[in-house]
Amino acid sequence: MPTPDTFYEVIRRQGISRRSFLKFCSLTASALGLGPAFAGQIAEAMETKPRIPVLWLHGLECTCCSESFIRSSHPLVSDVILSMVSLDYNDLIMAAAGHQAEAILEEIRREHKGRYLLAVEGNPPLGQDGMSCIIAGRPFLEQLRETAADCQAVVAWGSCASWGCVQAARPNPTQATPIDQVIRDKPVIKVPGCPPIAEVMTGVLTYMLTFERIPPLDRQGRPSMFYGQRIHDKCYRRPHFDAGQFVESWDDEGARRGYCLYKMGCKGPTTYNACSTVRWNNGVSFPIQSGHGCIGCSEKDFWDKDGFYQHVTDTHVFGIEANADRTGLAVAGGVGAAITAHAAASAVKRSQQKNKQGDDQP
Amino acid sequence: MPTGLPQVQQTAIYVYQAPLRVWHWVNALAITVLAVTGYLIANPLPSVPGEASDSYLMGYIRFAHFVAAYVFAIGFVFRLYWAAVGNRYARQLFALPFWRASFWRELVHELRWYAFLETEPKKYVGHNPLAHLFMVVIITVGGLVMIATGFALYSEQTGLGSWQDQAFGWVIPLVGQSQDVRMWHHWGMWIIVVFVMLHVYAAIREDIMSRQSLISTMLSGWRMFKDDRP
């Protein structure tokens, strides 16, 4: 059962040295974009504050967020990050199952009323009375509403919980709905991405533990330290963009030289995420570094924006799919032809009138 | 009494004051630069060879776009000011006589004139109703949409908390996401391109076939009428 141990006590019990602990604190401070001075503050918080109980629910999702989270690059993560917050309910990694597991939800709600964090991976389908996602014999929608009622704040993990993602893509048969449209009376922190970067996930939780407040959010509810800039703004291929050097096809010289992938439909210029700074898999790489454009997985409804491989994408209006350039050029051509025809007709008309006037005034 | 001289007296009215005429041509230039550079931002030119540090082509194209955008936006604000202090014709761009029945009647008449169903158009000191409608929809409403979406996109590089972000950043979530804003901004460009084609054609045609001057009016400010009939 969860104990209100401090984070520090837990990791010391697990045999992690104080040195490693302090390293983690300073790494986290810099990941959060805070100065080195904050490392001490983080260390103190972790030594003194009781761990925050976290309930981690899974709705309609693929568990890629959890898989990303447990692969957080810092070596301490498997032992530490998971115990930093007392993850009392996470059906991916908890030992309990069945009625025993469901009992934890009740207990946390009762004993930590108003204190626990609710982390949600995935989203609830509202269609068919929520029957498209059943947890423990009941619609996930009910579980979500009940646990959210007594929580402190909701962390919406991933693009599913933040925006809806693939299950909410057109035509969204189950009416999958992002968390902030279902839970309206609690602060919802969106951590989008499919999945979000592990260091971003741990960073957000560490911030909340250390400062006991929600990190600064942007207009759309995303932590601005990680989602304040676009991939494009910090992309190492940006100089090629500014110079006008683009990959024109996948196997051309530009692709080999690592030119900008803008013409290949890279969504870096429209995607807010930390991939180009934090990168993935222990900072090894990220999609653009591997030679493929960004698909914009942390952006709203990225499945419905058409063409991962074109920059000028289709626009859907009234069920019509149209590319602005193709349509624009066709319309401009049509109007040009119409103008020419109208001008010719006008000239004919005018000469007729002139002749008539000539007849009237001999 | 045949004298051999033209017998029709041409009346002239001073319609477009100098600042408004300057605005018109500056705006025309800005729109041209914006459309060309905007198209090239969406569909960049073929790759430049050599080291990245030797070229700054995309950078210059985007710079030209942003400079022209500021000219357009500041011009728009100036135009609003001029609507307040200028003559009555300066206000037409921001006031559509929506509830005036004669406006719609004359609009139909103007449409019939373009469809060759009327033998001659009516005379107007300011815009004819069709032009008036187009100006308000494309230049005023369309211009505002392009300024709002354009500055919203510009705010993505000036960053969170910049004045562009504070004033226009809300446009992005309103429309959907950054890519949507791009696409609507791009559609807007095509709408303006088509408008410019129609505008130039109509101005030349009206100059020749209507009963009043058009092109010279935007140069000199004086509207000349070719006849004295009502």
Image: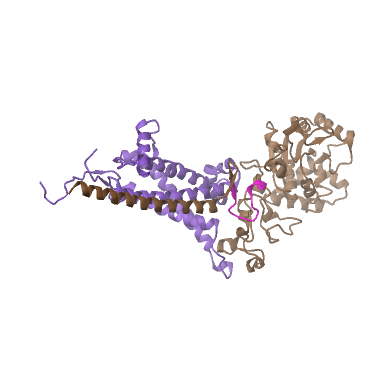
Chain colours: A brown, B purple
Q: What residue lies at 40% left-to-right and 47% top-to-bottom? A: B75
Residue B139: x %, y % from top left: 42, 44
Q: Which residues are magenta?
A: A302-315
**Which residue is more in the foreground, B195 or B25?**
B195
Residue extending farthest bottom: B50
Position of residue B151 relative to residue B100, above or below, is below
Residue B1 appears anywhere in the view:
yes
Q: What residue lies at 25% left-to-right and 48% top-to-bottom? A: A356
Q: What residue lies at 39% left-to-right and 41% top-to-bottom? A: B80
* Magenta run includes residue B67: no
Left or right: residue A119 versus residue B206 is right
Residue B209: x %, y % from top left: 30, 48
Residue A151 appears anywhere in the view:
no
Residue A323: x %, y % from top left: 57, 51
**Which residue is more in the foreground, B163 or A168?**
A168
* Magenta run includes residue A310: yes
Residue B95: x %, y % from top left: 38, 36
